[in-house]
Amino acid sequence: MKPIKTALATLSAAALALGLATMGGAGMAHAENQTNAANHGTMHVTKSPTCGCCGAWVALAREEGYDVEVTDIQNVTPTKRAAGIPGDLWSCHTAMIEGYVVEGHVPFDALAKLLEERPDIAGIAVPGMPAGSPGMGDDPAARFDVIAFGGDAGAGEVFYRAGL
């Protein structure tokens, strides 16, 4: 009986150590993302004051380390038109960062790619509100496209594929 208890105690300790090591690595990766995000200045988000999914996306952006300023307005349509977002790419909220438009529930890996590569485009968008996108359930396995528009992307081309 004693060897079984010893084995279980050892196995539990090993599992705890592995879990702590894994969490530490994940935390370090997250900290690195926050440092990178902090280097990009303030993100300005325009959204409806009653939109919960937009609020969830803003909260996730802050968790990623972005400095976010929010403007709540009843009618976001003029903002989208002024930003030059094609109508078929509209979503619920519109963000601006470093001269780029970020429309809708864009995953933060796509946003990081945009800010790192700095393509000659107006911005990126996730049309509609795909289930599992950031703020819409946050499922890393959710599959949807992030579309670039303006500049070299013209009316729109795939910039990033989420969930692949």
Image (tube, rainbow, N blue to C red):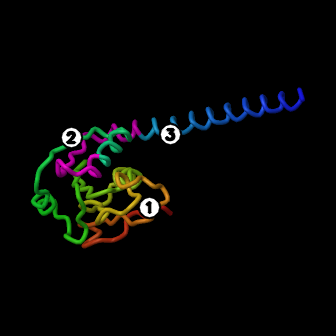
Q: x and y percent of residue 88 in the render?
A: 23, 72
How crowded is the residue under tag 3: few (<14 C-alpha within 10 Å), some, or many (20+)?
few
Q: What stretch is highlighted in magenta?
A: 34-55
Query: Between tags 3 and 1, which lies in front?
Result: 1
**Do tag 2 and tag 1 residues touch (Cβ < 8 Å)?**
no
User: Which residue is label 1 attached to?
Assistant: 162
Instruction: Report the Cα–Cα distance between label 2 and label 1.
Output: 26 Å
Q: Is mark 1 on a helix, strand or loop?
A: strand
How crowded is the residue under tag 1: few (<14 C-alpha within 10 Å), some, or many (20+)?
some
Which comes before the other along the chain, label 3 or label 1?
Answer: 3
Q: Does residue 111 lie above or below 32 as drawn? A: below
| Res 117 seen here | no
Q: Does residue 131 lie above or below 87 as drawn? A: above
Outermost residue to the front? 1
Image quadrant assignment for residue 154: bottom left
Q: Nearer the viewer, residue 3 or 134?
A: 3
Residue at the image position 38 percent from the left and 57 percent from the top = 133
- Amino acid under label 3? Ala
Image quadrant assignment for residue 15: top right
Residue at the image position 34 percent from the left and 37 percent from the top = 38
How crowded is the residue under tag 2: few (<14 C-alpha within 10 Å), some, or many (20+)?
some
Question: Does residue 73 belong to the magenta stretch?
Answer: no
Q: In which quarter of the image is the N terminus?
A: top right
How many marks do you count on the picture? 3
Which comes before the other along the chain, label 2 or label 1?
Answer: 2
Instruction: Report the Cα–Cα distance between label 2 and label 3.
Output: 25 Å
Q: Is mark 2 on a helix, strand or loop?
A: strand
User: Which residue is label 2 attached to?
Assistant: 69
- Amino acid under label 2? Glu
User: Which residue is label 3 attached to?
Assistant: 29
- Amino acid under label 1? Ala
